[in-house]
Amino acid sequence: MGKSLSNDFIHLPQAAHQLGITRGGLWFLVRTGTVKAERLGRYWYLAPAEVERVKELRQQNKGGRNDF
């Protein structure tokens, strides 16, 4: 049986929605290595812990420059 990230991980567009940023913005963060994601076929997924990490960073960054 093949690798199945889709059950345990969050699809990139869904993660972007949860984070309140665009898919393109999240994809940029993945491409630059700021956010860790796994690719399964043509789709990208984030671990729930990674989504929480980014949420916390965004909360800490409120009022300042919004890199997250």
Image (tube, rainbow, N blue to C red):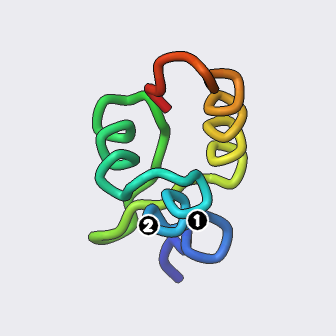
Q: Is residue 28 above or below residue 63?
A: below
In the displayed structure, would residue 3 be above or below residue 15?
Answer: below
The answer to which quarter of the image holds residue 60 is: top right
Name the element at disc 1: strand
In this rendering, position of residue 66 left or right of residue 31: right
User: Which type of secondary structure does the marked residue at label 2 adopt?
Assistant: helix
For the image, the number of numbered tags is 2
As shown in the figure, which amino acid type bears the numbered disc 1? Ile
Q: Position of residue 68 (x, y in %)?
A: 50, 32
Residue type at mark 2?
Answer: Pro
Marks 2 and 1, how far apart at CA:
8 Å
User: Residue drawn 60% across and 21% down?
Assistant: 63
Mark 1 lies on residue: 10
Q: Position of residue 30 (x, y in %)?
A: 37, 41
Q: Which residue is mark 2?
A: 13
The residue sitting at the front extreme is 63
Query: Where in the figure is residue 4, as x and y percent of width and height?
Result: 54, 74
